[in-house]
Image (cartoon, rainbow, N blue to C red):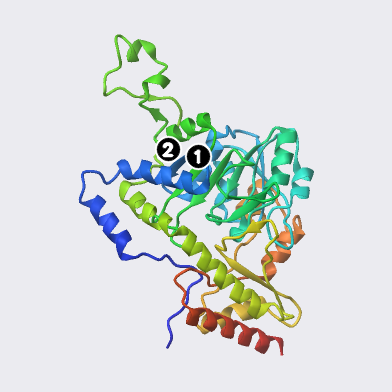
C-alpha cells in the first residue's frame, strides 16, 4: 500500500540538522545570537526594517494587537475564512472581531465589505492573505488611511508571496508598504519552519520597541527607556537592572529554533517556486473539469501557495464523499476553513449567526485543500491529480 500524502509537510535537510546541533552544543540554546541573526535576515528577505521573532504565529498575532493598542470595546475587521487565531487575538485584548465577507475568486477579505463594517469603534483591520494569495493591500491601505485605522497583515500563509506596486515594482509580503505590521507563522506546514514559531515585521521603530517588550514579560533592559529614575540612576544603573513597563508575556523563541529558521530561509525562494510549479500543474489538470473551481491568481500578485484549495461544485457532487474517498486513496485532503463566525463560542458569546456572510459560507461548503508542499516529487503530484480526477468523475456519474 502506498504511503499517504499529507496536505502539508516540512522539509528538513542535513545542513539544518547540523545548524541546530551546533547551537545545542554551544553556550546559548534559549536567548542567544541566532535570534537576532534570524530577525535580521527575515527583515532583509521581506524588505522591511525590523523583525521580532516569537514562539508561534498566534503569539505574533496577539503581540501585534497588544502593540497596536487594541483594547476593550475596540473593533477589528477581519475575514471569516481563516484559522481562529486570526480573530482570537482580538478577543485576547478585550476587543471585538467584526467580520467582512470575502472575494469569490481569491477567498480574501473584500475591501468593499470592509467599508460597510467601519464604525466609530473600529481601530484596525487584519487582512488575511488566504492560501498565500496577497490581499488587495493598496485598496485596504487607502481605506485605513481615510479612517485612521491600523493594518496588521496576517501573512501566516504568505511568506515569499509578492505583489506589484505602481507600474512595475514587485515587493514581498512583509515589506509593510501598506501596513503597520505583518505577522508570519513558522509552523511545520508553512513555507519555512522553526518547529513552532512566528514573527512580527514593521518599519516603525516605536512599534518595534514595544513588540520586543511585549515578547519578554513587558521587560526592558535598555537604559534609554528607563523611567524609574530614582532606582535606575542614583549614579548609573547596575548591570542587573531592568524594568517591567507593560504587562507582557513569555513569547520568546529559542536560539536553536532560529538556527533552523536561518537555514530554512535560505531555501525559501526555492520552496515557493516549487509550490508555484505544483499549483500550475494542478490548475492545468483541473481547469476543464466542470465540477471543479480552481483558485485564481490576480495579475498583480505572485501567490506563494501555502494551500491549493479547489471548490467542489454542489449538485451531483457531495464534498464529504469526495473528501472521504480521496482519504481512502491516501490523499491527505483537508478543509480550510470552517468560517470563524460559525464556531459555537462566537455564536454563543458574540451573537454571530449562520447566513451572515454568504460568500464565506458557500466557499466553506465547497472547499477542499489538496496536498501541496515542496518535498512532493512529480510522482506525488501526478498521483494527487489522477486520484482527484478519478474520484470526482466517479462521484459525478
271 vs 284: above or below: above
Q: How busy is the neighbourhood of tag 2: few (under 14 within 10 Å), some, or many (20 plus)?
A: many
Which residue in the structure is indicated by mark 2?
Answer: 215
Helix, strand or loop at label 1? It is helix
Q: Does the CB distance between marks 1 and 2 fall below 8 Å?
A: yes
Identify the residue at horizontal 58%, vertical 42% (top origin).
176
Residue 190 visible in the displayed image: no
Q: Which residue is more in the foreground, 312 or 236?
A: 236
Identify the residue at horizontal 33%, vertical 12% (top origin).
233
377 vs 106: above or below: below
Helix, strand or loop at label 2? It is helix
- Occupied quadrant, residue 289: bottom right
Q: Where is residue 363 in the image (x, y as percent from the top left)?
A: 70, 65
- Image quadrant where one finds the C terminus: bottom right
Residue 66 visible in the displayed image: yes
Which residue in the structure is indicated by mark 1?
Answer: 63
- Occupied quadrant, residue 392: bottom right
Q: How busy is the neighbourhood of tag 1: few (under 14 within 10 Å), some, or many (20 plus)?
A: many
Q: Position of residue 280 (x, y in %)?
A: 61, 72
In 3D space, how far apart are the residues under numbered discs 1 and 2 (Cα atoms)? Answer: 7 Å
Q: In this view, does 386 lie to the left or right of 287?
A: left
Identify the residue at horizontal 66%, vertical 79% (top origin).
286
Amino acid at each position: 500500500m502506498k504511503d499517504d500524502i499529507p496536505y502539508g509537510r516540512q522539509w528538513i535537510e542535513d545542513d539544518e540538522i547540523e545548524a541546530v546541533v551546533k547551537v545545542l552544543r554551544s553556550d546559548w540554546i534559549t536567548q542567544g545570537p541566532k535570534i537576532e541573526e534570524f530577525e535580521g535576515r527575515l527583515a532583509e528577505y521581506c524588505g522591511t526594517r525590523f523583525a521580532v521573532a516569537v514562539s508561534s504565529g498566534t503569539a505574533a498575532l496577539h503581540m501585534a494587537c497588544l502593540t497596536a493598542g487594541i483594547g476593550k470595546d475596540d473593533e477589528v475587521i477581519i475575514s471569516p475564512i481563516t484559522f481562529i487565531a486570526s480573530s482570537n487575538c482580538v478577543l485576547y485584548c478585550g476587543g471585538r472581531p467584526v467580520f467582512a465577507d470575502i472575494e469569490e475568486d481569491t477567498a480574501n477579505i473584500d475591501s468593499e465589505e470592509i467599508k460597510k463594517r467601519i464604525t466609530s469603534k473600529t481601530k484596525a483591520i487584519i487582512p488575511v492573505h488566504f492560501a498565500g494569495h496577497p490581499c488587495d493591500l493598496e485598496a485596504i491601505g487607502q481605506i485605513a488611511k481615510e479612517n485612521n485605522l491600523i493594518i496588521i497583515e496576517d501573512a501566516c500563509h504568505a511568506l515569499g508571496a509578492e505583489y506589484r506596486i505602481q507600474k512595475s515594482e514587485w515587493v514581498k509580503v512583509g515589506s509593510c508598504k501598506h501596513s503597520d505590521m505583518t505577522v508570519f507563522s513558522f509552523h511545520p506546514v508553512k513555507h519555512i519552519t522553526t518547529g513552532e514559531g512566528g514573527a512580527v515585521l514593521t518599519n516603525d521603530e516605536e512599534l518595534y520597541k514595544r513588540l520586543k517588550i511585549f515578547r519578554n514579560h513587558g521587560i526592558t533592559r535598555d537604559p534609554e527607556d528607563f523611567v524609574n529614575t530614582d532606582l535606575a540612576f542614583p549614579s548609573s544603573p547596575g548591570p542587573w537592572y531592568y524594568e517591567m513597563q507593560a504587562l507582557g508575556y513569555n513569547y520568546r523563541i529559542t536560539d536553536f529554533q532560529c538556527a533552523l529558521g536561518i537555514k530554512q530561509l535560505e531555501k525559501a525562494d526555492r520552496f515557493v517556486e516549487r509550490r508555484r510549479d505544483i499549483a500550475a500543474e494542478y490548475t492545468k489538470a483541473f481547469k476543464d473539469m466542470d465540477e471543479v473551481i480552481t483558485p485564481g491568481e490576480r495579475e498583480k500578485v505572485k501567490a506563494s501557495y501555502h494551500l491549493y484549495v479547489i471548490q467542489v461544485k454542489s449538485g451531483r457532487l457531495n464534498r464529504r464523499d469526495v473528501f472521504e474517498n480521496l482519504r481512502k486513496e491516501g490523499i491527505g485532503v483537508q478543509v480550510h476553513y470552517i468560517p470563524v463566525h460559525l464556531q459555537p463560542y462566537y455564536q454563543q458569546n458574540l451573537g454571530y449567526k449562520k447566513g451572515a456572510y454568504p460568500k464565506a459560507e458557500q466557499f466553506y461548503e465547497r472547499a477542499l485543500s489538496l496536498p501541496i508542499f515542496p518535498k512532493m516529487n512529480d510522482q506525488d503530484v501526478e498521483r494527487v491529480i489522477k486520484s482527484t480526477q478519478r474520484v470526482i468523475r466517479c462521484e459525478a456519474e
